[in-house]
């Protein structure tokens, strides 16, 4: 058995499966079709063959819940490529996918840097960055109680370590202090 090795290289990106900021779904089969079109275009323009692992997932963030796919790439030893060229090819492929699938923003995570690609500064209207809007949205969205917040839970601000109940949280928290964790009132500090 032959053994081929190369220096480890990885990259990961996640793309939504809704067109733009609409509720119009992109099927997984349509995504794969666009991925293969993009892979062919990248191969034709750069000579880089991008073998892509596709994993269905979901993006969840302050009111946004979007079906998505995570894309992963490695330095495939059989088709080893210069890392600078490989990185450029991956960025180009993601840009092609964003255009074809009407995506506004995504992030590509490499071992040495994280790159955000975006067409505009627009943010999905379902995302509630204001703390009061986020709590209201999540507590009135017909989710199961353990999804976010219900009466026997408190919010502990990570920055201050101060414990708030939901009313105090809405009254006292500033918009830039969105990092918090949920802790049951019954749990000991």
Image (cartoon, helix red, strand yellow):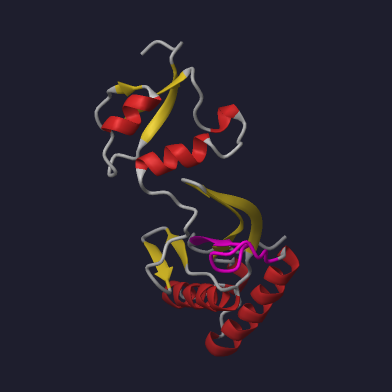
Specify whether residue 102 is in view: yes
Whether residue 11 is situated above or below residue 43 in the rendered picture: above
Residue 110 higher or lower than 37, as above or below: above
Q: Which percent across, then down, holds residue 32?
A: 70, 70
Residue at the bottom extreme of this rendering: 45
Please tell me whether residue 145 is drawn above or below residue 41 in the rendered image. Answer: above
Residue that appears at 58% across and 61% down: 16
Residue span colored magenta: 10-26
Q: How many marks?
A: 0
Frontmost residue, 171 versus 12:
171
Quarter of the image for the N terminus: give it: bottom right
Kindly identify the residue that appears in the image at 36 percent across and 26 percent down.
167
Quadrant of res 31: bottom right
Could you tell me residue 179's position as x and y percent? 35, 38
Residue visible at 41% across and 66% down in the picture = 122
Query: Is residue 12 covered in magenta?
Result: yes
Residue 20 image-quadrant placement: bottom right
Residue 39 x %, y %? 62, 78
Q: Along the line of sight, which residue is nearer the eye, 18 or 107?
A: 18
- 153 vs 42: above or below: above
Does the magenta run of residues contain 76? no
Image coordinates of residue 25 in percent, x first then y, are 67, 64
Could you tell me which residue is drawn at 61 percent across and 36 percent down?
142
Q: In which quarter of the image is the C terminus?
A: top left
Name the outermost residue toward the right: 29
């Amino acid at each position: 058995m032959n053994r081929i090795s190369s220096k480890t290289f990885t990259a990961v990106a996640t793309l939504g499966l809704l067109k733009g900021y609409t509720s119009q779904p992109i099927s997984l089969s349509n995504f794969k079709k666009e991925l293969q079109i993009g892979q062919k275009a990248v191969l034709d323009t750069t000579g880089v063959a991008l073998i892509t692992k596709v994993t269905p997932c979901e993006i969840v963030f302050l009111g946004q819940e979007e079906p998505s796919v995570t894309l992963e790439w490695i330095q495939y030893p059989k088709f080893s490529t210069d890392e600078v060229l490989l990185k450029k090819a991956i960025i180009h492929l993601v840009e092609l996918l964003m255009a074809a699938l009407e995506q506004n923003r995504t992030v590509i995570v490499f071992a040495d840097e994280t790159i955000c690609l975006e067409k505009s500064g627009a943010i999905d209207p379902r995302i509630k960055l204001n703390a009061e809007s986020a709590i209201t949205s999540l507590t009135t969205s017909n989710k199961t109680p353990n999804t976010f917040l219900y009466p026997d839970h408190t919010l502990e601000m990570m920055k201050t370590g101060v414990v708030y109940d939901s009313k105090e949280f809405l009254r006292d928290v500033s918009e830039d202090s969105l990092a918090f964790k949920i802790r049951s009132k019954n749990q000991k500090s």
